[in-house]
Image (cartoon, grey):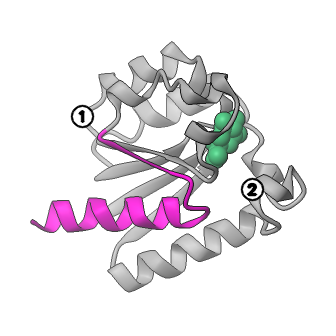
Amino acid sequence: MRFLIMNGPNLNLLGTRAPEIYGSKTYADLCAYIRQRADSLGVYVDFYQSNHEGDLIDRIHSAMGIYDGIVFNAGAYTHYSYALHDAIESVPVPVAEVHISNVDAREDFRKISVIRPSCAFTISGKGFDSYTEALARFVSEMKG
Ligand code: DQA
């Protein structure tokens, strides 16, 4: 099984951006943590991060036929990008919505996710484990 771990805007700044919310570990630390879990699950992972909506959309489109699922932290695009909602809906690849922080316990605008209806499930507020739990859930669901 092959999964794409995709991160949207500002997640490249993990470690320095609001560490009281997102922690002091970097984006590289995040990737290493997920890779370790992927190895223990026996699945293959690729990583992609972009600060640009169109690049994220292109990457979702090109996931067709390559990946069994996408674990996606869309950052602030979560809250207003109907284009990402439509991209997710337009491909047969299941997408898990993940967030490091608990978006339901923060500002009102973060409580709205416009991508959620097109996603298979959401995991929020578990730090880096939001990603690894999403990966493990995909694997257990797909292995049946
Ligand atoms: C985030 C939450 C979003 O509201 C925010 O814009 C982010 C990160 C999270 O992982 O907690 O960039 O998706």
Q: Position of residue 125 (x, y in %)?
A: 56, 54
Residue most extreme to the left = 144
State the extent of the magenta-drawn residues as a range.
Answer: 120-144
Is 131 situated above or below 83?
A: below
Q: Report crowding for label 2: few under 14, some 14 to 19, many 20 or more residues within 10 A (C-alpha).
A: many
Amino acid carrying mark 1 in the image: Pro
Callout 1: few (<14), some (14-19), or many (20+) C-alpha neighbours within 10 Å? Answer: few
Q: Which residue is mark 1?
A: 92
In front of the other: label 2 or label 1?
2
Q: Residue furthest bottom?
A: 40
Secondary structure of residue under mark 2: helix
Looking at the picture, tell me which residue is in the foreground, 13 or 59. Answer: 13
Does mark 2 have its CB less than 8 Å from ligand 1? yes
Q: Is residue 48 left or right of residue 61?
A: right
The residue at 77%/63% (across/down) is 23
Residue 102 seen in render: yes
x, y percentage for residue 40?
39, 85
Report the residue at 83% width, 51% height from top: 13
Residue 72 lies, in percent from the top left, at: 50, 45
Residue 22 is tagged as: 2
Towards the viewer: 138 or 90 = 138
